Image: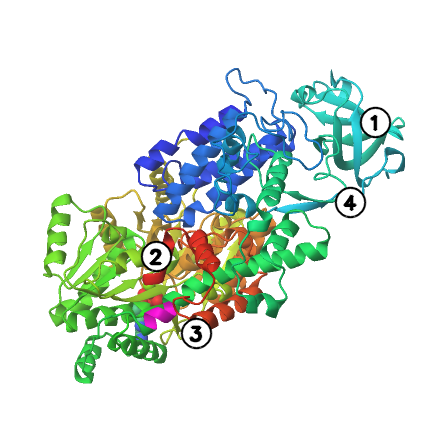
Amino acid sequence: MLHEILDKIRRPLPAEIQSDYANAGAIGGLDAHILAQTQRALELIQLGELPQDAEFSLQRLRDLWRRYVDADAALRAKIVADSQRLLEGLEAGGWGLGNGETQPATSIEQSALSSQQPTTGNEFPAPSPQPPAPKKNFRPDLSTELTYLKGIGPNRAKLLEKLGLRSVYDLLYYFPMRYEDRRVVKELASVEVGAKEAVMVTVLYPPQTKVMGGRMSGRKITRVRVGDDSGRADLQWWNQPYREKQFQPGMQLFVYGKIGEFNGLLQIDAPEFEILGENDTLQVGRIVPIYPMTEGLNQGPIRRAIHHALEMCGENLEEMLPDSILAHYNFPGLETALRQIHFPDSWEQQKAARERLVFEELFLLQVALAQKKINAHTEEIGLRHIVEDEKIKQFLKFLPFKLTGAQKRVMNEVRKDLKSPRPMNRLLHGDVGSGKTMVAAYALWTAHQTGHQGALLAPTEILAEQHFSVLTRLFKPMGIEVALLEGSIKAKNKRRIQADLSEGRVSIVVGTHALIQEGIEFNKLGICVIDEQHRFGVMQRAALQQKGIAGLRPDVLVMTATPIPRTMALTIYGDLDVSVLDELPPGRQPIKTVLIKPNSRERAYKMVRDEVKGGRQAYVVCPLVEQSESETIAHLKAATALAERLRAEELHDLRVGLVHGQMNVIERDEQMELFRAGMHDVLVSTTVIEVGVDVANATIMLIEDAERFGLSQLHQLRGRVGRGVHKSFCVLMGDPRTDEGKARLGVMVKTQNGFEIAEHDLQLRGPGEFYGTRQSGMPDFRLANIISDVEIIQQAREAAFQLVQSDPHLEDEKDALKRALRRFWGDKLSLIQVS
Ligand code: ADP
Ligand code: MG
């Protein structure tokens, strides 16, 4: 059964790769399909119908795919690749392969690793074949490859590599996800029925599986009789007959679980357990680390590997934090911190170790950001874009409206940056509809005025097209041509635009990712504007900047409609200056948001009809429904089916148009134009209209199955209405089942404030999934939590900026700090430090 599910997950992946990660392999998006399948598998595990051991990998898979919808192409590629690896691991686990029967799984402890002789004491067992004999004075440290570490043989190294652990650094910085306090281990005679307890027992008899009769008919129960000096108990599992193969009489077990009792015999249902070696002091009688795991590698071996690495390298670990900082915060040294985070002597010491390591991580992040920011300000050579006031006045005359105060203020900030000889690195955030496009237009126009080229980078084709048409309307009367470059245009056109750009015949270009690809060259790129930053990251920003005139960095303005929680402004965007558009253009109406259950959908359609009667227009956003079919056309079908149904039934008296992601550009444009021109009353669409689409006469948006959307996505969608002078509505149709789903829709109904929504989003999605870091190209945080560690973020930032102020190139700092920076940032460091 697991095999079947895994197969359903795997099958659409090649098509997804083929389609350049369009998230299109199934109706409602490949992510919805895979999430549904993993969820199903996880539920089956809960029911005991699939082996528990698959749980971790499935959870990882689920976590990966939850990020998919918001991920850029590069991250999507990584998610797909990681998934393929996880799937392989799951299959290799041997469950359900071939005959569809559940096969014996590796137990928590029975991996290839620990199936060797149990260890004695803290020693790491001697591996069989040794790697090349280490040199005499070889002192292993963080940079040592695990294969060269005495005591870790090729097999073990191979397994550790499955977790991405290649060097001692990887291993020692592979932190526990939680701990178990096993300092108190009870005797069976003194456990309390109903409580969760830890015991150390010996397996007394071979396990037995029984098929139940009566009410439980057909269910299988596997029992293992265990005991200690004081008593006996049964460990038992339902429908996991493979457990039989895991236990042999004489095995020592550490068992943790809820104690039950039946007919006077203690029973522990589906306990957590570990098979212990003799005198296994790493695993019991202490606070024990629990690591995130992969198939084939279990807690015991990884604990031993980490402990071993600490023993071998502890003394050689170099301190990278400046002594003044260690003293100021009273941090433990590196060796102590690493020992205490893995094998804490007490909770206090674990806490102190964690604080130091979180600080270290954030400090390494901030030092590079500080270098990027400070050195850019003082040293990098940019362009001086100087435009006289008179010219600017003329530009303003071409605008179709008066600027808001906020727009004026931000344009002045931008103008100052553009004038200065150092490159602009500015982040503009303003809620949906706050008028960012005009600020972008102003920056691009400046490039043209000073004889340079300006590029506007947008995350989707529809948004690029939208910008293209707005800018064309604005610039044409001024006699300025705008070009559009996107992936889907014909090769011939692309070549022409490419030539125009590299020879300088075009001064303003709008485009998607296609703009930052190899082969696109600019003649004199002076200013880049990047819209909807949350889909692009530092690295893409850097890639675009690299296309500047040799030796001169173009000015960069990054715009985002997703307001950024404070912690993120300090981390992922920590190298940028910030401007805020905190004022909406005049006359905007608040949007009334209501939640309607699907069984009252008539009410929703009546609201739509009422608006249309009043001369307004409506959007109906199609849900991403999951169906078993895995075709790219499935997406199209869902939207098409909805449009057809509405035309035939609920909205048969209205003119209903349709746009979706699978349409070609011309068709989509035509539909959008018809809607803009008022020829459609209602536009059924997929989330392709999520960002940027701007039709002021549209006053109501109905979102089907709203609970299936993320918070920031709902906010973006809602931003499509309330753009004119009329009162607007957002109808969330849905019946959320989960607490999180309820909370999300509740937030939407309660507030329209983008900042508030962003904070909620971050809280709801949790630190592990907060959007942006991965896409941003920043190193992953191994330990820091962007929500709860805000205080340490502040401290690390201050300390880092102070350090870089006084020593911009870290000339007087420890070599260990420079090495740590390189390790932490990898090959991204040079991009960060120079761009
Ligand atoms: P966003 O910040 O979401 O990108 P846009 O730039 O698309 O916002 O602007 C939203 C709408 O507001 C557009 O229709 C735009 O023409 C209009 N707009 C922008 N600035 C002003 C202004 N100062 N006065 C009136 N309307 C404005
Ligand atoms: Mg916009």
Residue 549 at x, y percent in the picture: 19, 63
Tell me, what colour scheme is on the image? Answer: rainbow
Amino acid type for the residue under numbered disc 4: Arg
Quadrant observed for ligand 2 in the rendered image: bottom left
Q: Is residue 579 visible?
A: yes
Name the one closer to the observer, 370 or 640: 370
Which numbered disc, 1 or 4, marks the residue that appears first in the sequence? 4
Residue under numbered circle 1: 227
- Between the C-alphas of marks 1 and 4, the distance is 20 Å
Residue 325 at x, y percent in the picture: 56, 67
Residue under numbered circle 4: 183
As drawn, the label of residue 830 is 2
Q: Residue furthest bottom?
A: 390
As drawn, the label of residue 396 is none
Residue mark closest to the camera, 4 vs 3: 3
The residue that appears at 45% across and 33% down in the rendered structure is 85
Which numbered disc, 4 or 3, marks the residue that appears first in the sequence? 4
Residue 149 at x, y percent in the picture: 53, 38
Residue mark closest to the camera, 2 vs 3: 3
Specify the quadrant of the image occupied by residue 481.
bottom left
Amino acid type for the residue under numbered disc 3: Ser
Name the one closer to the observer, 171 or 835: 171
The overriding secondary structure of the stretch rendered in magenta is helix
Which numbered disc, 2 or 3, marks the residue that appears first in the sequence? 3
Q: Is residue 433 visible?
A: no
Which numbered disc, 4 or 2, marks the residue that appears first in the sequence? 4
Name the one closer to the observer, 385 or 363: 363
Residue under numbered circle 3: 806
Q: Which residues are magenta?
A: 373-377
Amino acid type for the residue under numbered disc 2: Ser
